[in-house]
Amino acid sequence: MRLVIIGGGILGTAHAWAAIGRGHTVIQLEREREARGATVRNFGLVWVSGRSADELALTLRARELWAEIGGRVAGVGFRPAGSITLVRTHAELAVAEAAAAGPTAADRGFALLDPDQVRALNPALRGDFLAGLHCSADAAVESRQALPALRAHMAATGRYTFHEGTEARTVRDTGSGAEVLDDHGRRHAADLVVHCPGAAHSGLTRELAGELPVRRVRLQMMQTAPLGEPLTTAIADGDSFRYYPGYAGPQVDALTVEQSQTATAAEHKMQLLCVQRLHGGLTIGDTHEYTEPFAFDVDEAPYEHLTEVTEALLGRALPPVVRRWAGVYSQSVDPGTLVTRVRADSHVWVVTGPGGRGMTLGPALGEQTADLIGL
């Protein structure tokens, strides 16, 4: 079967990977020279720890697929480093204790560690905290290099072609298949077209699928120079309990009442996530903004907050910040929906809206779509 996949981000590439793995032929179109959206503006975390119970099975399948991919494609930089969520108040500790004793704790690889155990596992954490919720199932990939590595691997099959700097202008269902016209005047015939537009909800996406039940979410992040020592796990702070549905329960409800966030963290709907890149620098974030129009510039207050919290947990000053950026991702708003899939025509599908789960769930969502459309 011949597929044309529109969109070169993680979701489009994951669909290409699933199709190639099943013996099909894929042409992938990306309007930029390289993906520049949420795919490369994230932590590169494969995040099992906070996912809801309803999506845990799919998340664990994605974790399994990333491990398989990492074993085949070294360039994605997969490493099963795990994570530690560090708690600094007794209200946060109650959430961590409930999570470690919960019915899905074993599936997530949860263990509640005291400060000495935390430092034995991750010696870079020399700051003040009461405990750490370790999740051995969490992992990381290198988001800025994973996609080129995956494309090179697929190209070696002889059944994959990537057209960079190419925008799809029209998609036409032909009855027996579909045809895509690009902005170079080329026509690409296919048995199936899968459009993965990321946060581009207008234009071709609206033409094909109308108004979708999705919204755009903006974030701010930063990256430091090399730390000079290993950060052996990803780390998170207690504010992440408020954000991830896997922790939902009376302890989180009490947390929101008994322990207020800082004004900056509350205003920008913040959590701390921090992961070390292979080059030694730290990727640190993030914020959540839901109301458009989004600002075109970045706000300095969240970066000050992230620096303060990270330094408190590390017990040392951060290296210089070398990059700051904002990003926008697409999030499905239908309750219980992980991703929005619309059959736009007999041979045309639109897939978008994984929210902040795109890098984590990408391979499993691609596999799921392949099963759904009969690849």
Image (cartoon, rainbow, N blue to C red):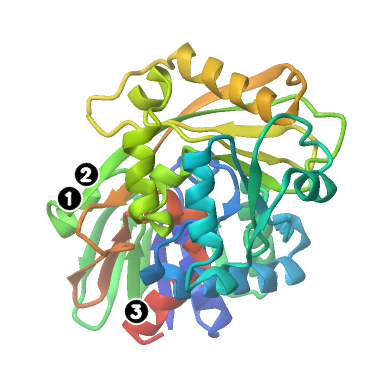
Residue 347 picture location, percent across and down: 25, 76
Q: Amino acid at mark 1?
A: Arg
Measure how far apart labels 3 and 1 are at the Cα level. Answer: 22 Å
List the residue tagged with mark 3. 191
Q: Nearer the viewer, mark 2 or mark 3?
A: 2
Is 96 situated above or below 350?
Answer: above
Mark 2 Cα-neighbour bin, 10 Å: few <14, some 14–19, many ≥20: few
As drawn, the residue found furthest toward the top would be 300
Is 210 situated above or below 183?
Answer: below
* Element type at mark 3: loop
Name the quarter where the N terminus is drawn: bottom left
For residue 206, the mark is 1
* Element type at mark 1: helix
Residues at discs 1 and 2 in contact (Cβ within 8 Å) = yes
Q: Nearer the viewer, residue 138 or 8?
A: 138
Q: Nearer the viewer, residue 293 or 93?
A: 93
Residue 362 picture location, percent across and down: 49, 62
* Element type at mark 2: loop
Q: Nearer the viewer, residue 82 or 220?
A: 82
Q: Residue at x 52, y 68 (%)?
A: 363
Name the quarter where the C terminus is drawn: bottom left
For residue 203, the mark is 2
Q: Nearer the viewer, residue 60 or 203?
A: 60
Q: Residue at x 80, y 29 (%)?
A: 227
Dot 2 or dot 3: first in sequence order is: 3
